[in-house]
Image (spheres, rainbow, N blue to C red):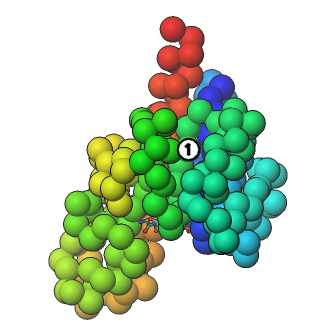
Amino acid sequence: MARLAVLASGNGSNFQAIVEALRAAAAAGGRRHGCVLLVHDRRAAYAAERARALGVPARYLPYAGRSREEAEAELAAALDEAGAELVALAGFMRLLSPAFVAARRGRVVNVHPAVLPAWPGAGSIRRAYEAGAAEFGATVHFVDEGMDTGPILIQEAFRPAPGSSLAEIERATHEIEHRIYPRAVLGLLDAIEAEGRA
Ligand code: GAR
């Protein structure tokens, strides 16, 4: 078994898709990885509700009123306490510090709703839509010091039918995310478990 922690700021649909995929893989036999912690930096994040419903321990990590380093020290302690070997950012809208990333290189992944390196940053689907982009999609990548810049693990693109609405494109993008992110996370947890056995 390898242990995953997820960091989220909002809705948490990717968090839920990952937890369900881990449980489905365990039920199918063999791959018994666990999501041991959800960390959310917004008190009212719906991801926390999902964690309660899924039975995943959740921890609120406020950033307000203190430095990023102080918040990250608490984050690091929570991850260590939970024994997390892989960290998945799922709509976590904060940049991790270079020191935090360097200490966990190759062990922190992110999903982004665009075909990186196109459209990094927040609000990427809307910005691409408003610019008249022909191609949309999603990317899973390792986290490095930049914003949505680390080495790419999986990427899938699509070309919406002419006249598609923003809502239709968002829905299609999230469907891709919910498919490729759990797949990437499961693969990494398999590799971490295999490393532990070697
Ligand atoms: C997802 O579309 C994710 O790719 C995006 O936030 C959304 C969170 O949805 N992340 C970024 O834009 C990071 N730059 P969710 O909370 O329902 O998983």
| Front-lying residue, 30 or 148 | 148
Q: Identify the element where label 1 is drawn.
A: strand
Q: Quadrant of the N terminus?
A: top right
Percent x, y of residue 152: 30, 46
Residue that sits furthest to the top in the current view: 198
Q: Which residue is found at the position 70% from the left and 41% from the top?
A: 77
**Image height check: is 186 above or below 13?**
above
The quadrant holding residue 167 is bottom left
Q: Which residue is found at the position 67% from the left and 71% from the top?
A: 65
Q: Circle 1 sits on which residue?
A: 87
Quick check: 13 left or right of 161?
Answer: right
| Front-lying residue, 25 or 94 | 94
The quadrant holding residue 82 is top right
Q: Is residue 185 visible?
A: yes
Percent x, y of residue 138: 35, 61
Name the residue type under label 1. Val
Quick check: 125 left or right of 7?
Answer: left
The quadrant holding residue 71 is bottom right
Q: Which residue is found at the position 26% from the left and 60% from the top?
A: 116
